[in-house]
Image: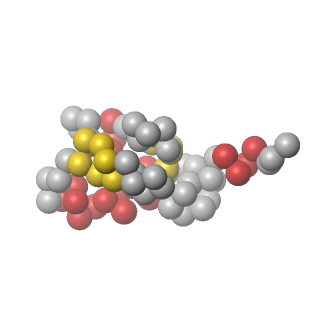
């Protein structure tokens, strides 16, 4: 059986998940990693993002990343 810790790692930073946020495609990432990765898009009021793992496109909920 695989080690459970492999399932709780952030795809962006490869560390244990901190303040996890789940995308509609069901991939999860650390909140701080998402803020860093998408900071420019969010600052420019772009409300559609691609999942860093599977590239699925989705619309941010009202309130942004905080509401994932």
Q: Position of residue 28 (x, y in %)?
A: 50, 45
Q: Is residue 50 left or right of residue 53?
A: left
Where the N terminus falls, by quadrant?
Answer: top right
Quarter of the view holding residue 65: top left
Q: Position of residue 38 (x, y in %)?
A: 31, 59
Quarter of the view holding residue 62: top left
Residue 32 visible in image: no
- Residue located 18% across and 59% down the image: 43
Q: Farthest residue in the left direction?
A: 45
- Residue located 17% across and 53% down the image: 46
Render colour scheme: secondary structure
Q: Is residue 16 left or right of residue 22?
A: right
Residue 26 visible in image: yes
- Residue located 20% across and 47% down the image: 47
Where the C terminus falls, by quadrant?
Answer: top left
Q: Position of residue 40 (x, y in %)?
A: 23, 64
How many discs mark residues in the rendered view? Answer: 0
Compared with 61, 36 (above or below) is below
- Residue located 44% across and 39% down the image: 25
Q: Position of residue 49 (x, y in %)?
A: 29, 51
């Amino acid at each position: 059986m695989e080690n459970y810790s492999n399932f709780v790692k952030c795809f962006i930073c490869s560390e244990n998940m901190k303040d996890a946020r789940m995308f509609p495609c069901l991939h999860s990432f650390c909140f701080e990693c998402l803020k860093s990765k998408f900071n420019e898009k969010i600052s420019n009021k772009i409300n559609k993002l691609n999942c860093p793992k599977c590239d699925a496109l989705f619309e941010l909920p009202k309130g942004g990343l905080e509401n994932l």
